[in-house]
Amino acid sequence: MARECDGGASVRLANAAIPAAFQDGDGEDLALFDITLDGARIASVEPASGSLIGARDCAGGIVVPAFVDMHTHLDKGHVWPRTPNPDGTFAGAMAATGRDRAAFWSADDVAARMDFALRAAYAHGTAAIRTHIDSIAPQDRISWPVFAEMRERWAGRMTLQGCSLNPIDLLPDDLGPHFDHVTEHGGIVGAVMYTVSGREAKLRALLEEAEARGLDVDLHVDEALDPTRNDLALIAAEATRIGFSGTITCGHCCTLMTMDDGEADRTLDAVAEAGLAIVSLPLCNLYLQDRVAGRTPRIRGGTLVHEMAARGIPVAVASDNTRDPFYAYGDLDMAEVWREATRLLHLDHPVGEWPLAFSATPAAIMGLPDRDKVAPGAVADLTIFRARRWTELFARPQVDRTVIRNGAVLDAPLPDYRELDDRWTLPR
């Protein structure tokens, strides 16, 4: 729903503080501009004139492109009330999710939870999402049709991409039918890498089949704090050997935080040479990892994002799981992810190019055009914050933000958790 302005009309936003990372050319860290929107596109961006005639005054508030959340699990989301993680560990999450999937995941259940999650993300200002979809039979025959239907239902409001999710050792030897099913529903392919016999051959087959079909690949990689695990290096080597022409995204990559500097440097050099993209999921990894009962965690979740950026490796930051056994919290609010990632990974002093990691960089990885700048010709999907400085932006949750979609101010309330009460019996 739109209010205050018609998405088909010309609208001027006065005194908008645009971060330098989103300016068309060099500029100050936060400089004031007047932005003219012409329907679904930005028509002009000019230095602030001081005139408020016929304009919406942003009053120095920070304006950024719509968020792009490129690593989520919409099929798992919001099951916590019926199937919590008993101890908060990764093993506990795996076991609880398996129980919940077997007991409850019908098409109706997945659709209800997925739609709820999308409405929350939409209200928070996200314009595109990539979701991993559990694709082990028989669940693949349930969730993929639901995703395809949801993608059509949300067309024009939210761009959705799906990615298959299988443990690397459980990928079928004949990948043809698996790939056919995923691509039939508009998805790309992926897997969870972990230390298991034969993973090298499975990875090679996956990448070769994806290359033959012209598909991108998105993998869960090294989601642990074990310095002996280095599947990232294996993926980089295979991508280089094949000469992979698409985009391979590697999510998590947490073991880099525990490696010695020499091995980490060699791995990141190989990643840069192979042209891999990285997505960090610091909130979920902070929740799960280094969790031992009765002991304070020693290592924060994340990966070596600064070292990656220094090598020109594309780095995105995303939400990951939401209110499920892998992460008890979250609301697919990328402003929250940005705020907390800034604190956890030190994406500040200077802020520099890091705002790109929450919109422009994931958009580029996902192949979405015209979402890299607040500039003429770009999509008129924006978020306006009341905050005027970085310290204001990251100090509060920014619940009073204004979301603009297709040139119109969005009036989309957050869904009420009570809508999902019929999915479980809530504890008293």
Image: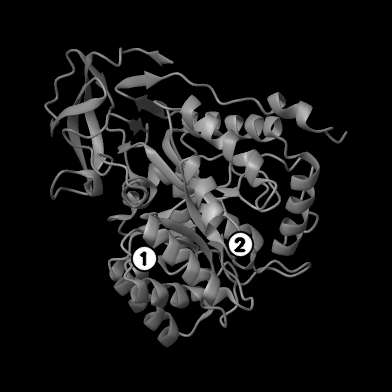
Quadrant position of the N terminus in the picture: top left
Place of residue 137 in the rendered image (x, y in percent of width and height, measured from the top left): 68, 50
* Residue 321 numbered tag: none
Q: Secondary structure at mark 2?
A: loop
Please name whichever residue, 281 or 115, is drawn nearer the observer in this view of the structure: 115
In this view, 267 is above or below 128: below
In this view, the residue farthest toward the right is: 428
- Packing grade of label 2 (10 A; few <14, some 14-19, many >=20) is some
Place of residue 59 in the rendered image (x, y in percent of width and height, measured from the top left): 28, 27
Judging by the rendered image, the residue that carries numbered circle 2 is 172
**Colour setup of the view:** one colour
In this view, 299 is above or below 285: below
87 horizontally vs 283: left or right: right
Quadrant position of the C terminus in the picture: top right
Sequence-first tag of 2 and 1? 2
Residue type, numbered disc 1? Leu
246 horizontally vs 200: left or right: left
Judging by the rendered image, the residue that carries numbered circle 1 is 276
Place of residue 104 in the rendered image (x, y in percent of width and height, measured from the top left): 77, 39
Residue at (11%, 27%) from the top-left corner?
A: 49
In this view, 283 is above or below 4: below
169 horizontally vs 185: left or right: right
- Packing grade of label 1 (10 A; few <14, some 14-19, many >=20) is many
